[in-house]
Every structure is written in structure tokens, then in C-alpha cells.
Amino acid sequence: MFSLLIIIIYLVFISLGFSTPLLGSGWPVMHTELGVPISYAGIISMIIAGGTIISGLLANRVTRRFGTQKVVALCLLITAASLFGFSLSGSFIILCLLAIPYGLCSGAIDVALNQYVALHYTSKHMSWLHFSWSFGSAISPYIMGYCLTAGRGWSAGYRWVTLIQIIVTVILFVSLPLWKRKDSEEVHSINSSKVLSVPQALGIKGVKAVLISLFAYCGIEGVTGLWASSYLVEFQGLHPEVAATFASLFFIGVTAGRLISGFIADKTGDKLLIRVGTIIVILGIALVAIPFVGGTPALIGLIVIGLGTAPIFPSIIHSTPSNFGAGNSQAIIGIQMASAFTGLTFMPPLFGFIAGVIGIWVYPLFLLLLAVLMLVTSEMLNRKLTVETNKTIPSNP
């Protein structure tokens, strides 16, 4: 029964991944029909991002009060309703209003399931959880693309994904009896511990370091994915159509890397995966920086960056209970997700501003600075945890 539950959790994350790229893949047609500038997609995405950040900060209190299963089931139903509303809307203002519950609820699902898997499953399942999201987000643009090329319009793309999400929601409601928490000291400590406020959680040694590390990681992910094509065209000299095709190599690397890392995560451990993954990211950035006719090193570098980033986020989240205690982990994971969403939201436009002033050539340098920041803060966390562990070990008389 427990193995069946993790499969259902994977399905939920796949459906969450389905819905995420729809706005970007459908917007070239949507903005014309809605009669708004193409730049207005940023307004909707910022509203969604704001909702996810708020969800991260509130998730601990909500999941403690209502339980992970109820929060996920209700929020999945609301996101399905929001997506269906998107498919019916012919107004930009309505889309903005629908983006509010969608952002809040999709963020709540993300945080709640990350918390649940971190507490109840091994590291490999966390890797495969995020592989599930990547798998869904990789397929979703093809659904929208098919609907557009078939002449069914962007609304049909949203309706298809809504149908998928409704099916998963029904499965989730049917599976609610499977969500019985294991009777263990770990879970008891969670239920009996007090709810941490954000300042209290930030006061725990090592929390600030891991927040900065996650912020930097998501900055790398967001900047790499959004600006790869522009860098390949403007600096590496590739044709725009070729660059657009090969820019997806980063996402392919992330998806494949999370699938692969799941098979080795339990043996290597979270700390080693984070360290090795960061080093691989730096290697990939170095390849991206090489100016070469045809951009071959850069294309290889995008795959390498994707492979390197793949295990980092799942490993950081999964290691939270062991790093900070099961009783504190729910509050800290929520704040971690808020920090991650913040980096993913604000780093890409910040780089766009810098690139507009200095030039797109700064792309690998910007990524390198984030990677070094991630490595430094990650190692700071490891040292702090080692010191704290040594303090708890009594010395020999």
C-alpha cells in the first residue's frame, strides 16, 4: 500500500508539471486573442510566483492543521478549476484573477508533497518526485502545440490538461485512506513540537545558508532555461531556430539526471550528490563560455549543467529532516520552497537587465557567480552541522 501511495504522489507531481509550462507555450497566440502586449505574460507569471512564495511561508501551519492529504487533494481540485477557468476566459484581467488561486494552490501542493516525501521516503524517491514534475513539464508544450496546430486553439490545450488534473484529483481522493502516517517517533516529534514562526526558523543554525544555496540554485535553473537561446544566438552565432531547439537540452539534462540520480541517491547520500552536482554545474558553465564555431561546447555544456543541477534541489529538500530535525523540518522546508520560488522568479529578469546593460556575453559569468555562491553556502552548512554534531558527542574522560 505504501508503494502504491508513492506512485499516486508521482502522478500528482506529473499533473503539476503539465500545468506549469502552458502559459509560456500558449502565450504567443493567447496575447493576440486577448488583445494585450506579449510582455503581459510576465504579469501573470509574477502573480503565480507570488502565490507560490506565500504558500511556502504558510504551508507549515496549513498542513499541520488539515493534514498533507487533505491540503493536496483540495488544492489539486482548485488548480484544476483554475485551469478550466483559463480555458474559458477571454479577458486578461480574469486570467490574472485566476492566477491567484492557481499560484497559491500549486505552491501548496509543491511544498506539502516535498515535506511528505522528505519525511517518509528515501532520497531516491525525492529525485523521482522531481523527475515526475520534469516529465510532465516536458510533455505539456506538445499538448498545447498539438492543439494549436490542429486549429483547436489554446483553450483546448488548457482543457486537456484540466481533464488530466481532474482524473488525478479523483485518484487522489480515492486514495485518501492510504495517507495514514506511520506510527513512529519521528512523526510523533512533528505533531508534538510547536509551530515555528519564520524568524524562529531563521534563527536555527544553518538555515540561512541553505536558503541562500537554494536561492542560488533556482537562479541558475531559471537563468539557464530562459536565456540559453538568446545567448546561443547573440554570442555563439547560432541560427534562432537551431538555438531554440538546442536550448531545450538543458531541460532534457535535468529530466534525465533526476531519473538517473534516483538509482544512486540512497547509496551516495544527499551531501555527496549536492557537492558533485555543483561541481558538474561549474564544468558545464565553463563549456558554455567557450566561443566555438557552431557552438558545440556550449550545447554540450547546457546538457552538463542540466545533469549537474538535477540532484541538487531534491537532495537539499530531502536532507532537511536529518539536518534540522524532523520536528523543525516542515517549517524549514516551507521557507526553503519560498526562497527557491523567489530565486526562480527574480533572477532571470535581473540577468535580463544586466545583459541589456553589459551584454549577453555575461551569461556564463552570471551563472558561475551563482554556482560559486551555492557551493560556498552549501559547504558552510556542512561545516556548521559538523560542529553541532561534534558538540553533542561527549568527549572521552
Image (tube, grey):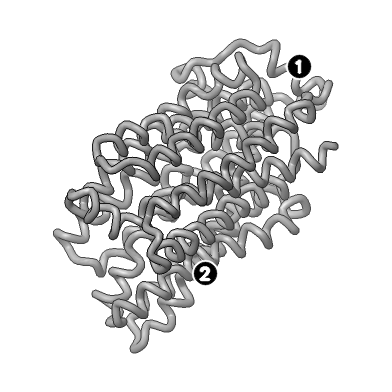
Identify the residue position indicated by label 1 in the image: 188
Amino acid type at circle 1 is His
As drawn, is 188 to the left or to the right of 230? Answer: right
Q: Which quadrant of the rendered structure holds the C terminus?
A: top right
Q: Residue at x 55, y 21 (%)?
A: 60
Label 1 SS: helix
Identify the residue position indicated by label 2 in the image: 304
The front one of 142 and 373 is 142
Q: Residue at x 31, y 44 (%)?
A: 346
- Percent from the top left, x then y, of residue 169? 62, 36
The front one of 108 and 378 is 108
- Percent from the top left, x then y, of residue 75? 54, 29
Does residue 369 appear anywhere in the picture? no
As drawn, is 156 to the left or to the right of 118? Answer: left
Q: Which quadrant of the rendered structure holds the N terminus?
A: top right
Against 7, is 147 above or below? Answer: below
Between the residue at mark 1 and the residue at mark 2, the CA separation in whole angstroms equals 42 Å
